[in-house]
Amino acid sequence: MDPLTILLIISGIMMLLVTLLYAYQFIYLFIPLIKKRTKPYETKLHRYAVMIAARNEELVLPHLLDSIHAQDYPSELVDIYVVADNCTDNTAQAAREHGAIVFERFNNRLVGKGYAVHDLLEYIKSSAGLEKYDAFLVFDADNLLEPDYISQINRMPCQGFQAFCGYRNTKNYGTNWLTSGYALWYLHESSHMNRSRSILGVGCHVNGTGFGYTRQLLEQLGGWNFFTLTEDIEFSNYCAINGIKIGYCHEARLYDEQPFTFKHSWKQRTRWSKGGIQVSLKYGGSILRNFFRMNWQTQTCAELFSLSLWGFGYAALASILSLSLAYFASHSLVGLALAAGSSLLGGYFSMAFMAFWTLVLEWKHVRASKKKKIISIFTFPLFMFTFVPTAVVALFSRVKWDPIPHTVAISSSELSNE
């Protein structure tokens, strides 16, 4: 058997493994069609500390605070804390005027949401005391909550989950191809990924904002000590490794704002890519070891591996080998171009179908015109393709945490009217 044939066989096996590694993402598109039966549980009204990390957010923060005050959950069981993190505007004053307890933090060395949440918890511990609360909810300043958000998310600790998250939608879906791209990904993550995980009984993943955890888990953690550039992914990895199943509540709905300039989008997604690398290096070995537990952690850890530096790196290596062999087998750049073109087209139409199917399930929840929704199906793959250069840049550059400005200052009622 000649060397080229051997390499072709190896490449075929590698691409088969890539297919198996990511096949769950296709299967998850249709699992939400299954109706999940919830086991009976005892309802209890838990006491919550709502925590918001804000940096120069005086424009949007008041609307979030108003949406929390408008919750149908008993207000005496909800305390709102805002950490005004290295602010140079009137964020702290705006938070106080809208009924929040404010902790002002100034630290230009330890920068990032993870550090801000850590310090805010230390402030709560020294003032009200952590034991005052049953659970903690974490939001970003640009969020808006549906009026029943806390009532719905309260089902999670009632069902025994120590960590949990809700449904994430977008305030500015229709601004341009960037905002709709972000929005479709978050809707996919909520409606297909986390919802399917919940139905299957495996661990869900925290996605940036709109998540919570019990005081018992916080005590087990020894405080909030997740400081990578993507502390949410780090937290999800920690939970999977340590047997903490994250719950998902599809009825707990919030909306947030997405970057609408390519400059800010590039900065944010480069940070995400760098944070993903940090988490992969920190937790990769433990994720692989836990893969062999043969329980719900096996599936959760397999997913986290596929979404890590190692999973993407393996898929990229397999693709490069396949394209290289296409060139050597044909001895022509035309053969290479055809192979690369077919791969790109396959990726484009796969992602376009994912966007289409997401809109099929979530059409009535998307705040945008029919025309903009349809256009977003075709621009979504382009948005996803732009993750590739951000990942490459993140591999070879130093990336720091920088705030993304938020300017979509609308209230919950205005959003509903839209």
Image (cartoon, rainbow, N blue to C red):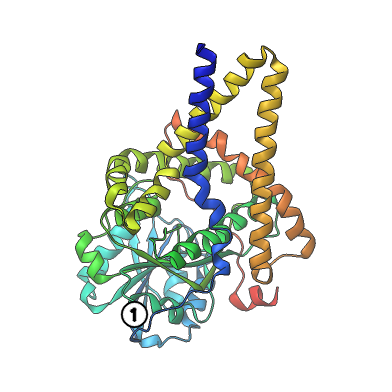
Where is residue 405? Give x, y as percent.
54, 54
Please indicate, yes or no, whether residue 222 appears anywhere in the rendered image: yes
Q: Residue 78 falls in which quadrant of the image?
A: bottom left
List the residue tagged with mark 1. 158
Residue placed most toward the observer, 255 or 267: 255
Which residue is rendered at x = 43% and y = 78% of the image? 38
Residue drawn at x 33%, y 38% as measured from the top left: 281
* 269 lies above or below 335: below
Q: Is residue 382 left or right of residue 405?
A: right
Q: Nearer the viewer, residue 307 or 260?
A: 307
x, y percent for residue 233: 39, 51
Residue type of the residue flagged with mark 1: Cys
> How far from the left and from the top, in percent, is residue 42?
33, 86
Quadrant in which the C terminus is drawn? bottom right
CA neighbours of label 1 inside 10 A, class few (<14), some (14 to 19), many (20+) = some
Q: Residue at image x 63%, y 79%?
A: 413
Q: Quadrant of residue 106?
A: bottom left
Q: Nearer the viewer, residue 353 or 158?
A: 353
Residue visible at 44% across and 64% down? 200
Q: Position of residue 148 (x, y in %)?
A: 50, 81
Q: Secondary structure at mark 1?
A: helix
Q: Farthest residue to the right: give it.
A: 371
